[in-house]
Image (cartoon, rainbow, N blue to C red):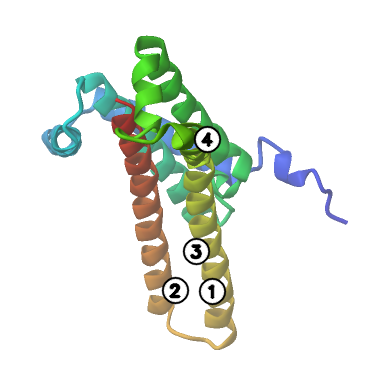
Amino acid sequence: MMSLFNSFDMFFTPMLWMISFFIVLLIGSKIFKTNFMSFLEIVIFKELEKFFLSLKMKSYNKGMVTIFLTLFLFLFVLNFSSVLSFNFALTSQVSVVLFLGLTSWLSFIMFFNFNCWKGFISHCIPEGTPMYLIWFLFIIELISNSIRPITVTVRLVANILAGHLLMILLSQLVFQLNLCFLFYLVLNLVEIFVSLIQAYIFSTMLTLYYADVN
């Protein structure tokens, strides 16, 4: 009988080996850096920088671009590793994604309140609001801001989980009906594309939240 704790065996978990592979790959890319990799990093960094500038924030620094780029690559590696190792991604776990979203969102809110708490209050209350609606609108705006980490968590977890379940069901159908292996390869390519898009959406949503409080 299989043990319930087999999935926690660190030495035989495919997810651990895949993450280790990507870490070695990233370290190797720093040692044996090619012109193509340098060009790719510059292109991605410049595109994120243009996106930040298009938001017209009051304060902007390249350090934030690096942070969101790192978050995007981290999420994509987690999603992509699960596709290759045939395991459920860590990003399909609510606790993992909620921790990432909550810590990022709280850091934005705490930073903004520490620098300008009056601006945060004025942001929650539209200009020209009647006195008897101030507290009501403030509470509604506070609730809408508070559920933002939950919304990005549900979005990422639901899409990744649905994608993996669909791939498992269709892959079983491929083997049972002896369909072409090319069809299964297309499914994996679609799943990789979904992993890339979901990592991009999660990072973009956090970027918009940062721009909103900024």
Residue 33 image-quadrant placement: top left
Residue pictured at 40% horizontal, 78% vertical: 183
* Residue 146 placement (x, y as % from top left): 52, 35
Residue receiving disc 3: 163
The disc placed on residue 184 is 2
- Of residues 53 and 2, which is closer to you in this image? 53
Q: Amino acid at mark 3?
A: Gly
Choose the circle earlier in sequence order: 3 or 4.
Answer: 4
* Residue 180 placement (x, y as % from top left): 43, 83
Choose the circle earlier in sequence order: 2 or 1.
Answer: 1
Residue pictured at 83% horizontal, 54% vertical: 2
List the single residue furthest toward the right: 1
* Residue 40 placement (x, y as % from top left): 16, 39
Pointer 3 local density, CA inside 10 Å: few below 14, some 14–19, many at least 20: some
Q: Would residue 176 be found to the left or right of residue 49 on screen?
A: right
Residue receiving disc 1: 171
